[in-house]
Image (tube, grey):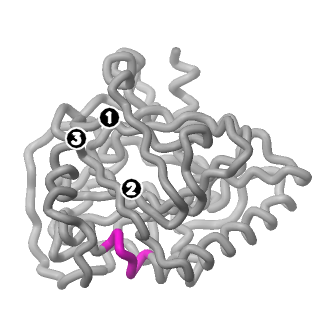
């Protein structure tokens, strides 16, 4: 196993809740991931609504509101590792995973995966939230690896993170009895001014703590922004709720060994709502309706 992170990068991660990894994918891996996504995007032009099957009996492929046959706008692929050898191979072996093992290893399991895509001019935004509020576990050693399949710039809807919020409180994602999958406008107003963008070349990745507050804006550029997101957990972090992106590969040990031990941390939250739509965008749409 390689050790991509320096001591300074490891210290940065624990202080800020994220770290950037260059060359997280090899050129061959990146090419294979892009090729499969392009094929799915082309296929989506023959559909007018979300389609495909997953273990959760929800559509695998989700389409943006602007989608049309002439201008396909595939915005989400749920659990691509189940339908692509390329994505499955990368999930099991990449430089970012080696970095994850440095941070929460040595024993690491796969948790879930997805692709989030924003085509040029797309209205899709991700409202500010904390991933952990979708997926309670016995402890909080979960890391999402966001692989850049395109160059990510300041204009094409980059990830925006609020450094240090992983060490603060867990913010409610339920509001007036509705699970919106987002923090309140008051929390956003307080913390978003401190957000910083994460951008870089295709093939790089951002590693993000499960409690880190983050979101992203619409793509206002002429270039797509596509992320493959693979999430990993410490092998002794046991799920307390059904996986919101279930996969036959959930719990596969991708680094180290299985110990059959459980480790617990102290926190409190209201259980998340299990999504019923094609993606969490339908949950976050409730935030607009509630305002």
Q: Is residue 198 highlighted in magenta?
A: no
Q: Position of residue 75 (x, y in %)?
A: 65, 51
Mark 2 Cα-neighbour bin, 10 Å: few <14, some 14–19, many ≥20: many
As helix, strand or loop, the secondary structure at mark 2 comes to strand
* Numbered badge on residue 206: 2
* Circle 1/circle 3 CB separation < 8 Å: no
| Residue at image coords 56%, 84% | 85
Q: Position of residue 216 (x, y in %)?
A: 50, 37
Among the two numbered marks 2 and 3 on one chain, the one whose residue lies closer to the N terminus: 3
- From what the image shows, is residue 115 above or below residue 190? below
Q: Is residue 93 highlighted in magenta?
A: yes
The answer for how far apart the CA atoms under marks 1 and 3 are is 9 Å
State left or right for residue 109 relative to residue 229.
Answer: left
Q: Which residues are magenta?
A: 91-97
Mark 3 Cα-neighbour bin, 10 Å: few <14, some 14–19, many ≥20: many
Nearer to us of marks 1 and 3 is 1
- From what the image shows, is residue 188 above or below residue 239? above
Question: Which residue has dot 1 on it?
Answer: 162
Residues 97 and 262: in front is 97
State left or right for residue 121 relative to residue 81.
Answer: right
Most common secondary structure along the magenta stretch: helix
State left or right for residue 43 relative to residue 191.
Answer: right
| Residue at image coords 52%, 34% | 284
Residue 59 in view (yes/no): yes
The answer for how far apart the CA atoms under marks 1 and 2 are is 14 Å
Q: Residue 47, located in which quarter of the rendered image?
A: bottom right
Question: Which residue has dot 3 on it?
Answer: 166
Residue 283 in view (yes/no): no
Q: Residue 94, located in which quarter of the rendered image?
A: bottom left
| Residue at image coords 43%, 75% | 91
């Amino acid at each position: 196993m390689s050790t991509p992170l320096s001591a300074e990068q490891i210290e940065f991660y624990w202080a800020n809740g994220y770290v950037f990894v260059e060359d997280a994918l090899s050129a061959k891996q990146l090419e294979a991931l892009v090729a499969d996504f392009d094929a799915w995007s082309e296929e989506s032009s023959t559909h007018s609504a979300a389609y495909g099957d997953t273990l959760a009996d929800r559509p695998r492929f989700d389409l943006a509101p602007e989608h049309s046959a002439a201008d396909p706008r595939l915005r989400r692929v749920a659990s691509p590792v189940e339908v692509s050898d390329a994505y499955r191979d990368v999930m099991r072996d990449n430089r970012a995973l080696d970095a994850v093992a440095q941070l929460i290893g040595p024993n690491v399991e796969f948790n879930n995966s997805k692709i989030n895509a924003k085509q040029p001019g797309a209205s899709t935004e991700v409202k500010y939230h904390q991933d952990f509020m979708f997926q309670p576990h016995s402890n909080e050693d979960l890391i999402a690896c966001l692989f850049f399949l395109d160059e990510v710039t300041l204009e094409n809807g980059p990830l925006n993170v609020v450094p240090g919020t992983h060490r603060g409180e867990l913010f409610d994602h339920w509001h007036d009895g509705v699970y919106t999958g987002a923090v309140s406008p008051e929390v956003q107003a307080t913390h978003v001014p401190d957000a910083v963008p994460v951008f870089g070349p295709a093939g790089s990745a951002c590693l993000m703590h499960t409690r880190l507050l983050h979101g992203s804006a619409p793509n206002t550029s002429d270039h797509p922004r596509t992320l493959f997101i693979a999430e990993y957990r410490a092998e002794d972090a046991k799920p307390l709720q059904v996986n919101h992106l279930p996969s036959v590969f959930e719990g596969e040990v991708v680094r180290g060994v299985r110990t059959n031990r459980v480790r617990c941390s102290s926190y409190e939250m209201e259980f998340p709502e299990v999504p019923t739509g094609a993606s969490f965008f339908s949950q976050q749409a409730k935030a607009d309706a509630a305002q």
